[in-house]
Structure formats: C-alpha cells, structure tokens
C-alpha cells in the first residue's frame, strides 16, 4: 500500500492520539510522515509502513518517534477479500483495543507484545519492535530461542488468568467477536487452506504406499480440539498462530526476550494449544522429541513463576495437568504443520516474494496444491523428507491405542 493511500486512512487527529498514548496527554504532534518498509520481511495478511513522528513534550522538549503502521493490503484485493471473510483485521484491532490493555494491566513483565497506540477498524499504530532490537530468527527455533518463546506464551496465558479473575468474567463472554474462530472452522476461507492441505497429504500418502485412509478422519478432529474446552481443560487467551515468523527476539542475556506479533488468529482455548503449535511449526520431528518434555517443564515453570509474581492467590496447574492437556492438544500443532509447512516451504522455494504477490501467493495458500507438492518433492529431497515426516506423524497418531488402553 502506498504512503499516499495510507494517509487517507490515517488522519492528523489519529496521529495526535497515538502521540498522546505514546508520550502522554500533554505531548503535541508537530509533524509526521510515512515511509515504506522496503527490504524488510513483512507479513502475509497486512500492509506495513513506518510512521515517523516529531512531537513536543510537556516541557517543550522535542521528541521523535518511529512507530509501526499496519493496514489492510488494499493494493492486493484478493488478500483484502480473504482478510474480511475471516475477519482477521477486525479481530486483531479489537484485541489491541480491548483485550491487550487488560492483559498488560495484569502482569509486570510486558515485553511479550508490542504496545498499541491506536487501533481502528482498518489501521493499527504499534511500537516499532525493530528499533528495540527485536528481530526474526528464522523458521526454526531451538535452544534459548525456544525457551524464550515458551516463556512469552506463559506470560500471555498467565496474564489472561489474572485478568479474568479481576474481571469476574471470561474474555469469551466479554469479547465474543474477538475470539470467533478464524482458522479451524468450516465458515471461513481457511477451510479451503485446510481442505486442500489434507487432499495433498492424502495424495502424497497414496503415492508412497502409506495408510492414507486415516488422514482425513484424524485431521477432522482438530475443529473440536481448537474450540473452547467445555470443562475438561482451562481456557485462556491464546495467540493461535505461533509459528516462528510471529516470534521476534532481542539479544538480552541470559535469555533473549520474545515478543509476539500478528494476533489475527486469536482464540479462546486451552493454553497448550499454543505450545503445541509452536513446537510443531518451529521444529522437526527428531528435535521436537528431544526437547518436548523439557519444553513443557519450562512452560510450566514460567507459568507458575508469572502467577506467583503477579497474583499468588491463583493456583497454577500441575505439571501433570500441563502434560495431559498437551497430549490432548498436540493434534492442533500436528495438523497445522501438515497443512501449512508444505505451503510456507513452497513459498520459500519458489519465491518468497509470492507471499505478498496477490493471486500467486493466495493460489498456493488457499488453492489445490497436490500436484505442486508432489512436483517439488521430486525436485527437492529435503522438502520430500519434511512432507513425508508430517504425514507420517498423523498416521502414527491414528495408530495410537486409545487413552484408556494405556492406563
């Protein structure tokens, strides 16, 4: 989206409001300008620019800010149609406007998300995390970066527990439109993403002589798993899309800090659904199996620590509870990875710019792709190994004995 087009969505009064929210009610806007983010990796479902601001504070001192502006990608109509169909921008804007402030009020450590200085139905003005030395660390996360991401999820989930205690109501009751499911539902464009992803997996399994008959059945259970739990598990505010490109890190020691971005798929669900999605989207099978239990222990420790520091009256879940909940929720991460990792890798192989190139990228993400997947598997051995690995895990899951048989 061009700077002139963004200016039609962002008025001087809007920028003045952002200045007040960032610098205080006595701060006054002097001038502002928008600059493109050329050379920086940007997201799929939005257009991004830098907002340069000159202002004066209460004492007349000059202050400059560089903030981050997110809008709908109006120059890519097919993406706008998808975003509006799934209500992604509406969900994210209302999250920043109504939910995030309550979460931030409930916890001392606030680094886990950028602060929002203006939230409108088609524009967000946020902290510029890049200027705070936060950056992406690639599509895979291991070691300290995985620990950091897990700590951030624990902070977010703890803040939701504490805020709900103060509010006396669940966030789902208070803001049902924010937590309307965008991905694991038959009513949005993401059902095409899911359907064609499962079709591609079945086609690959048939071609390689694998048990393809169970794939659709197993994957179909994800819709119920991702919904708010009805009494079995505690629900919290979940990010919903915890892949590595939604996790930015600084270089703090001894542990880098992680900030989450892109809250478009926010949901109200059991907490370990976020952990499962992170583990399956940011690691491969061998690495995941090495770190899975330790990652869950670390998540549990960080959740206990956050609750103890911010509201010791809330009883944290036991480690056994976390482990059992994760076993129930990990299908969400498993299916998400099987459907989405082949797509994200296609975009890396073919041309990463396709992620923002309109019909080409949208066709790959939401279109029929079994032929393209099999073609790339023939051409790229690493891609082939990855696709077969994720399909194999679904088949292994189907072959598990029922829970009662393992007790």
Image (spheres, grey):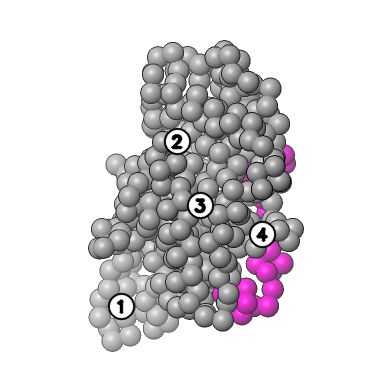
Q: Residues within 10 Å of mark 2 (few under 14, many from 20)?
A: some
Residue, disc 2: 285
* In this view, the mark in front (1 or 3): 3
Sequence-first disc among 1 and 2 = 1
The residue depicted at 51 percent of the width and 31 percent of the height is 390
Disc 3/disc 4 C-alpha distance (Å):
15 Å
Give the Cα distance between marks 1 and 2.
Answer: 53 Å
| Residues drawn in magenta | 162-187
Residue 284 x %, y %: 42, 36
Image quarter hosting the N terminus: top left
Closer to the camera, 124 or 325? 325
Report helix, strand or loop for mark 1.
Answer: strand
Other residues around mark 3 within 10 Å, as few (<14) / some (14–19) / many (≥20): many
Secondary structure that dominates the magenta span: loop
Is disc 3 in contact with disc 4, using a CB cutoff of under 8 Å? no
Q: Whole-Å distance between the Cαs marked 1 and 4?
A: 50 Å
Q: Is residue 241 left or right of residue 192?
A: left
Label 1 neighbourhood size at 10 Å, few (<14), some (14-19), many (20+)? some
List the residue tagged with mark 1: 56
| Mark 3, secondary structure of its residue | helix
Q: Which residue is mark 3?
A: 275
For discs 1 and 4, the disc positioned in front in the rendered view:
4
Badge 4 density bin: few <14, some 14–19, many ≥20, Cα 10 Å: some
Which of discs 3 and 2 lies nearer the camera? The answer is 2
Q: Which residue is mark 4?
A: 233
Q: Residue 120: in sight, yes or no?
A: no
Taking depth in this image into account, of 346 and 57 the one nearest to the observer is 346
Sequence-wise first label, 1 or 4: 1
Question: Contact, CB < 8 Å: mark 1 with mark 3?
Answer: no
């Amino acid at each position: 989206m061009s700077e002139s087009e963004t200016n039609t969505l962002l008025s001087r009064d809007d920028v003045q409001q952002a200045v007040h929210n960032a610098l205080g009610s006595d701060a006054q806007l002097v001038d502002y300008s928008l600059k493109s983010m050329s050379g920086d990796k940007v997201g799929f479902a939005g257009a991004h620019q830098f907002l340069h601001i000159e202002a004066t504070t209460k004492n007349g001192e000059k202050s400059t800010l560089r903030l981050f502006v997110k809008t709908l990608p109006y120059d890519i109509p097919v993406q706008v149609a998808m975003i509006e169909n799934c209500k992604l921008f509406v969900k994210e804007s209302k999250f920043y406007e109504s939910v995030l402030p309550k979460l931030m009020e409930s916890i001392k450590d606030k680094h886990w998300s950028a602060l929002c200085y203006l939230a409108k139905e088609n524009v967000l003005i946020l902290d510029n995390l890049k200027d705070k030395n936060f950056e992406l660390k690639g599509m895979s996360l291991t070691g300290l970066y995985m620990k950091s991401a897990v700590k951030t999820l624990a902070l977010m989930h703890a803040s939701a527990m504490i805020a709900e205690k103060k509010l006396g109501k669940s966030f789902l009751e208070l803001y049902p439109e924010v937590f309307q499911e965008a991905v694991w539902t038959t009513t949005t464009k993401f059902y095409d993403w899911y359907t064609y992803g499962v079709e591609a997996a079945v086609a690959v399994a048939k071609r390689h002589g694998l048990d393809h008959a169970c794939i659709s059945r197993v994957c179909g259970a994800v819709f119920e798993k991702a919904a708010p739990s009805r009494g079995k598990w505690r629900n919290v505010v979940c990010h919903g899309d915890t892949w590595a490109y939604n996790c930015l890190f600084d270089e703090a020691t001894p542990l880098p800090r992680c900030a989450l971005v892109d809250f478009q798929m926010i949901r109200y669900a059991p907490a370990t659904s976020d952990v499962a999605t992170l583990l399956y989207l940011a690691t491969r099978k061998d690495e995941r199996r090495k770190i899975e239990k330790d990652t869950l222990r670390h998540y549990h420790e960080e959740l206990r620590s956050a609750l103890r520091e911010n509201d010791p009256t809330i009883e944290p879940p036991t480690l056994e509870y976390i482990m059992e909940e994760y076993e129930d929720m990990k299908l969400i991460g498993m299916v998400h990875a099987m459907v989405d990792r082949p797509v994200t890798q296609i975009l890396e192989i073919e041309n990463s710019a396709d992620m923002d190139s309109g019909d080409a990228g949208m066709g790959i993400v939401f279109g029929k792709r079994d032929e393209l997947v099999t073609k790339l598997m023939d051409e790229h051995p690493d891609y082939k190994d990855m696709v077969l690995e994720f399909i194999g895990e679904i088949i292994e899951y189907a072959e598990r004995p029922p829970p009662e048989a393992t007790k």
